[in-house]
Amino acid sequence: MSILLFVMLGVFIFMMFRRNKKTQQQQAELQSQFAPGVEVMTSFGLFGRIVDMDDVENKVTLELSPGNLATVHRQAVTKIVEPLAVSDEDAPAVPAVPDDASSLTARETGTQSASVETPDETLKRLNDEGKKDN
């Protein structure tokens, strides 16, 4: 009975080491594909493009959006994001919405153009609207 227990313990330890080795190989393969310009996702959900890599300090500089950079540990980058190739046939029919939504807000507020309003005017308008609601 004790021999069976030792055999089962040995198999368990073997499987545990095998799994760790497999995970390390996958991580090493992923990190070998890192290069500037590659779109990636971090372990905490940030998406960005690799701008610079520091192999000595294990740091990766990501551009999250134009002009916004973040430096993360190399192991925090867990996935390479590949853009989806969507054909016109597969794309759902979505109604066109203008990029400039100021025309929508101008109709709602009754002003001629929301983009002409200064910050002081905006603050005054919002305060006045708050007084009307009470």
Image: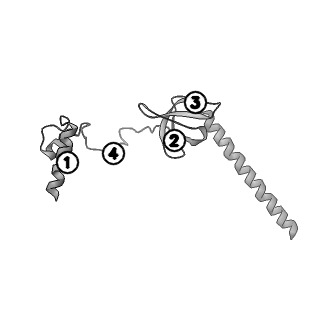
Query: Nearer the viewer's eye, disc 2 or disc 1?
Result: 1
Disc 4 element: loop
State the residue at coordinates (74%, 54%): 15
The answer to whether residue 96 is above or below residue 55 is below
Amino acid on which disc 2 is placed: Met
| Residue that appears at 16% across and 51% down | 129
Cα–Cα gap, marks 3 and 1:
46 Å
Q: Earlier in the sequence, mark 1 or mark 4?
A: 4
Q: Which residue is mark 1?
A: 126
- Secondary element type, mark 1: helix
- Which residue is at the front of the view, 28 or 69? 69
Q: Is residue 122 left or right of residue 64?
A: left
| Residue that label 4 marks | 92
> Relative to the observer, which residue lies in front, 14 or 41?
41
Amino acid residing under circle 1: Leu
Dot 1: few (<14), some (14–19), or many (≥20) neighbours within 10 Å?
few
Tell us which disc is closer to us: 4 or 3: 3
Whichever of callouts 2 and 4 sits on the residue coming sooner in the sequence is 2
Viewer-nearest of discs 3 and 1: 1
| Spatial CA span between label 2 and label 4 | 26 Å
- Nearest the viewer among 77 and 28 is 77
Task: Write down the residue under mark 2.
Answer: 41
Residue 74 picture location, percent across and down? 60, 37
Instruction: Indicate the quadrant where residue 120 lies.
Output: top left
Q: Is residue 95 left or right of residue 131?
A: right
Q: Earlier in the sequence, mark 2 or mark 1?
A: 2
Asked whether 4 or 85 is in front, the reply is 4
Answer with mark 3 or mark 1, whichever residue precedes in sequence: 3
Indicate which disc, 2 or 3, sits on the residue closer to the N terminus. 2
Crowd class of label 3 (few under 14; some 14 to 19; many from 20; radius 10 Å) = some
Q: Nearer the viewer, mark 2 or mark 3?
A: 3
- Check disc 3 and give the amino acid type: Met
